[in-house]
Amino acid sequence: MNLLDFIFRLGVVFAIYGFLWGIFDIGIKLIASGRKRSISEVYLFKAVKYFFLVDVTFLFCLESLNSEMIILNQVIFAGIILLTYFIGKLQQNQNKRMLFNFATNGLPMQDNTFHLKKEIAVITIALSAFVLFWFYPYIASNPISIWFHESIINIEDTPIFGFIFKVIGFFFLLNLIFKMLGAITFILNGGKIGNRVNSNRRNEQEDNHFDDYTEIN
């Protein structure tokens, strides 16, 4: 399997996993009767979500579920893809927060579900788990990850849903290229994504000093 085919396959895997996790998350919210989650609960769920995403991704790098033999080049590329994916998510969430602060003129967020240190910690734990699986592949094979693996394959083989998720996988392939570029920029800038947004906000505040009726689109 060449690199593009493998990235495309992981795109399908990520899309179907997100769909399955979304169903699980909706079920948890219904059980909780709409109770608002605390920031700790948000990141606990995210940690579990990322852990099993890493786990399932690793299973697709094995020769088979009954084998502990890894396909080395796929494991390496999967690690790079996961790192890019997580950094892209971090960048996206941080940008949303910066833009919200800009749009609200720095007012506190009513629903603050982003915490940079916790976000980095969750990503670090997930990637550390992936490294652990590399050295101890048997740990990755557990009932939950195997269920996700088999469910993903079953959905992928379904004519209609399989085609839909393959289309999503194609766009994932394109999006990943842009995320890689964004992740490289993010790392080189030391995570300072919102500098331009903050600069624009300062300029807007200066304008507002002279015109209280300035409209923000």
Image: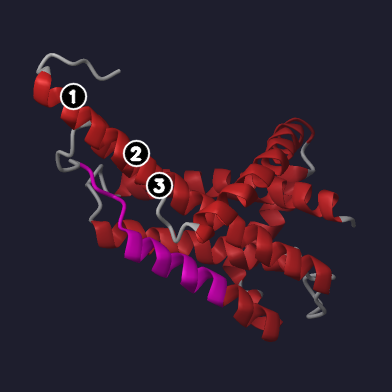
Q: Which residues are magenta?
A: 111-128
Q: Nearer the viewer, mark 3 or mark 1?
A: 1
Relative to 212, is 161 on the left or the right?
right
Residue 64 location, x and y as percent?
Answer: 82, 70
Q: Which residue is mark 1?
A: 207
Name the residue type under label 3. Asn
Regarding mark 2 in the picture, which secondary structure is present there?
Answer: helix
Image quadrant assignment for residue 2: bottom right
Which label sits in the foreground, 2 or 3? 2
The colour scheme applied to this rendered structure is: secondary structure
In space, the residues marked 2 and 3 are separated at their CA atoms by 14 Å
Instruction: Give x and y (percent) for residue 22.
Output: 49, 45
Question: Which residue is outermost to the bottom?
Answer: 135
The circle on residue 93 is: 3
Q: Find numbered disc 1 in the image and state the secondary structure of the residue it sits on.
A: helix
Find residue 119 and report its image quarter: bottom left
Q: Residue furthest right?
A: 1
Dot 2 amino acid type: Val
Q: Looking at the image, which residue is at 34% across and 38% down?
A: 197
Q: Residue at x 22, y 47 (%)?
A: 36
Q: Circle 2 is placed at which residue position? A: 197
